[in-house]
Image (cartoon, rainbow, N blue to C red):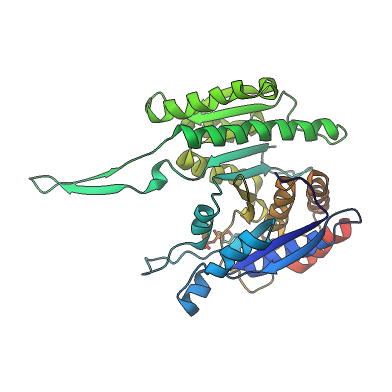
Amino acid sequence: ATSAKKTLTIGLIPADGIGKEVIPAARRVLEALPEGAPKFNFVHLDAGFELFQKTGVALPEETVERLRAECDGALFGAVSSPSHRVAGYSSPIVALRKKLDLYANVRPVASARGQKDGKPVDMLIIRENTECLYIKQERIETTPSGEKIAWADRRISEHASRRIGRMAFRMALARDALRQKTPEAERLWKGPPTVTIVHKSNVLSTTDGLFRETVRAVQGEDPAFEGVRVEEQLVDSMVYRMFREPHCFDVAVAPNLYGDIISDGAAALVGSLGLVPSANVGDTFVVGEPVHGSAPDIAGQGKANPVAAVRSAGLLLEHLGYTNEAARIYNAVDSVLVKGNLVTPDLGGNATTDQLTDAICRQL
Ligand code: ATP
Ligand code: MG
């Protein structure tokens, strides 16, 4: 995280579908932060599948250049994924992660205070975002008898495992510091800061073995890390326990594919995709991004839930060093959700995106 300064320049990339509705909502919430918060400059930037259909470019060079040159961080909306392969098109958010070396996908999964349905959960999932099976080294061969066999390589490196491990330890400590700072807030997690390493090294002893050993070894790098409890969970039992007793987890760190699967699974614990934020984090840049997609079924109707995007703006602030402002946003969202009278249709209400956003702004 960079150290706090008074003016923040934030790139806004709404991209497709409801991204165009929820990113402006997140912007309004940032602007509604009370006195003492940083001043915001917003830079509007293009990307997306719709842009590709118009111009043949999904992620303009200018967007990347201006993020690098002008912005402290960014908020990304959503991209529609075409249902079939489109020649020349590849996902702009995937490209952005590569270009800015955003090697971690960070996803807090938390039930709202007072939420009645579902199990209480307040965990943070950290997914490695650069390797594992996502290196896409696949090949297919045909045996003499005409049978096809397909192969995929999976890369796990010490370098990538070490930096994701460091992030997990740092974030476990940051969450703990926030809990200490606000003892009045009721917390689900009562134990010491804990990192759960998710792997399958009983089967994949070489690749997952390296991930597990490397993340464990990070603990010895910094005396502060000694206060963190390290646990392990095989990915299958991780899924089982996450659904049965999600309150048993604080920070979970996982290689790319397991991380993908458990983060969507965990999102199911909190009721609506419209509630779950994420951040793409590197050593020098952060992009907040709601977990949901472009939701073509409800796009343009003013009924998208803005909370995932608003919480993503909070995550962005957290990573830029503005923990207090982030906490204000989370609390305002929680208060509005707990009252429950001003929520969007995905949560069983009939408020519009704007009405829910207004309520959050008023709460701030
Ligand atoms: P994409 O290809 O962009 O991922 P999708 O069809 O998979 O599009 P998602 O955005 O992943 O759509 O959403 C899945 C379901 O959840 C849809 O029915 C959508 O309407 C709903 N949904 C997603 N985000 C929200 C939101 N912010 N508010 C309300 N409903 C949402
Ligand atoms: Mg989707």
**Quick check: 148 above or below 20?**
above
- Percent from the top left, x then y, of residue 138? 30, 48
* Residue closest to the far left: 144
**Quick check: 332 above or below 266?**
below
Q: Tell me the residue at 42%/35% (across/down).
A: 156
Residue 352 in sight in this render:
no
**Quick check: 300 above or below 154?**
below
Front residue of 188/68: it is: 68
**Location of the N terminus (image quadrant):** top right
Q: Tell me the residue at 49%/37% (across/down).
A: 160
Residue 335 in sight in this render:
yes
Front residue of 240/55: it is: 55
Residue 220, located in which quarter of the rendered image?
A: top right
Q: Tell me the residue at 37%/27% (across/down).
A: 206
Residue 221, located in which quarter of the rendered image?
A: top right
In the picture, measured across the screen, residue 26 lies left or right of residue 360, that is: left
Front residue of 184/298: it is: 184
- Percent from the top left, x then y, of residue 103? 54, 45
- Percent from the top left, x then y, of residue 363? 87, 56
Q: Tell me the residue at 67%/33% (across/down).
A: 170
* Residue closest to the far bottom: 54
In the picture, measured across the screen, residue 183 lies left or right of residue 347, that is: right
Number of on-image labels: 0
**Quick check: 91 above or below 255?**
below
**Location of the C terminus (image quadrant):** bottom right
* Residue closest to the far right: 35
In the picture, measured across the screen, residue 273 lies left or right of residue 357, that is: left
In the picture, measured across the screen, residue 335 lies left or right of residue 164, that is: right
